[in-house]
Amino acid sequence: MNNSWFTLPTLLLAIAVVPAEATQDERRVRGEKVIETLAGTGGQPVLQQMHKDFPFLAGAITDYALGDVWGREVLDHRTRQLATVSAFAAQGNLPQMKIHAGYALRLGVTPDELKEIIYLTTVTAGFPRAIDAAQALREVLASADASPP
């Protein structure tokens, strides 16, 4: 039997993969903790559905976006939400802005602070984007008022 595939580089690569899997698990756990902090114990419905339909995409979101980026401790979750709402408002990405505005409220950001972020959007992205973001924020705030505490 020829064992030419069993070389030192192959062995080192095989050994290197084992810690990477542990790191992958750690990233997943960190990402799941972040989504629980943001969305509560019920999870995030879009991400939950994505785990069923697009597991590779959901895994990347959970591991990288949530575990590696959102899991960092340089900024607190509240500050990250303000920055994220601002970015999505400026991009005109209203579905994502609404999700993160809801997270922001859950983390103690006030409606007035969110309104100020939208007002700031007039400078960074223009009045049309700010008007659209204001309409989307109105929906989030109306929904939050209707939700039981």
Image (tube, grey):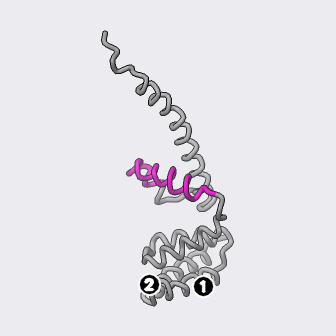
Per the image, label 1 sits on a secondary structure element best described as helix
Q: Which residue is mark 2?
A: 129
The structure residue drawn at horizontal position 49% and vertical position 83%, both measured from the top left corner, is 124
Q: Residue at x 64, y 84 (%)?
A: 112
Q: Amino acid at mark 1?
A: Glu
Q: Secondary structure at mark 2?
A: helix
Image location of residue 125, percent across then percent down: 45, 84
- Residue 22, image x, y percentages: 55, 37
Whether 121 is drawn above or below 78: the answer is below
Find out whether residue 24 is within the magenta segment.
no
Compute the Cα span from label 2 to label 1.
14 Å
User: Which quadrant would the N terminus be assigned to in this image?
Assistant: top left
Q: Sequence order check: which comes first, mark 2 or mark 1?
A: 1
Relative to 127, is 66 above or below? above
Q: Which residue is mark 1?
A: 116
Q: What's the magenta region?
A: 48-72
